Image (cartoon, helix red, strand yellow):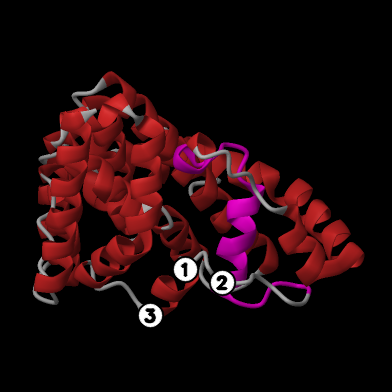
Amino acid sequence: MEAFERQIRAFAADMDHELKAGNLSFPTVFDLSLRIKKIADDPNSSLENIAELVRAEPLLSAKVLRMANSLLLNPYQKEITSVASAISRIGLSTLRCLAYAVAADQLARDHRSPRMRLIASGLWVHSIDVASWAYAFSRHLSQGNADTALLAGLMVNIGQFYLLAKAADYPALENDTARFAEFVMLWDEPIKRAVLEAFELPGDIVQAVDLNAEGPTEWPPRTLDDVVFLATLAAQTPDPFADLLGMRRRPELLDASLGNDGLRELDSMIEAANATRKDMLAAVSG
């Protein structure tokens, strides 16, 4: 375990340096997300400029077209074959979501360590599960913007994805995944905050992905924070890092905040929103 101890100390020092310098060194897997963000934020960029960047990434192009033609966003099923038209249909917020989903999917597939690749795959599935529930709950409740809820749901685990990507430089960490999980849970929140700041996401999203929050205190949920919190509890797939540490979802959080009537309302909402959640899950992960 000498190599593990040496590398995990080096990893911690690396993360501490990046945080103190305020300059995260993004792994190349996030390049696409950052380029999409930069061009989408540029007021001088046209739809064609954005479409040109998307067309250069075949996997992202395929996802954009598939989502634009999904029943959820194209109920009349008039086929969209142009990338520019597809971006116009889904919107820039959803395009950012898809760019991030592509990055997370590539991380899950390309990680050099088989054990880490398995963890990354589980984290990706969990992330899109949470995001899809957040989107579905937001639409069902007519609470806020469902696209914003989708993006917030995807960002819940961004710190963990960043740490997983950086872990490729420390191959000995795969020798003790439980201790690596402890490391990730320790660094997740500060890294997540730094990544969200680097992505310059709105304050309501930054606040919503703080899972130290206590959750909703009344029914119906009224804020993006509430929607994302409930989405993390509704997710049918576990956070693999929490799973490695034996941490389970805590139903007492709901008991304390919602009470019996609120729990019944939540069950009804889950049932009513499940079809929308499945449609969005298929659109993002397809």
Distance Cα–Cα, label 1 vs label 2: 6 Å
Evaluate whether residue 11 shows in this view. yes
Using residue 230 as the reference point, say whether residue 48 is left or right of it.
left
Evaluate whether residue 136 shows in this view. no
Position of residue 5 measured from the top left corner of the image (x, y, whole percent): 21, 38
| Disc 3 residue type (three-letter) | Gly
Which residue is denoted by mark 1 in the rendering? 210
| Disc 1 residue type (three-letter) | Asp
Position of residue 25 measured from the top left corner of the image (x, y, whole percent): 9, 56
Q: What stretch is highlighted in magenta?
A: 219-242
The answer to whether marks 1 and 2 mark residues whose Cβ atoms lie closer than 8 Å is: yes
Q: Please, is residue 114 above or below residue 20 in the view?
A: above
Which residue is denoted by mark 2 in the rendering? 213
| Disc 2 residue type (three-letter) | Ala
Name the residue: 31% across, 66% down: 190
Which residue is denoted by mark 3 in the rendering? 203
Q: In which quarter of the image is residue 165?
A: top left
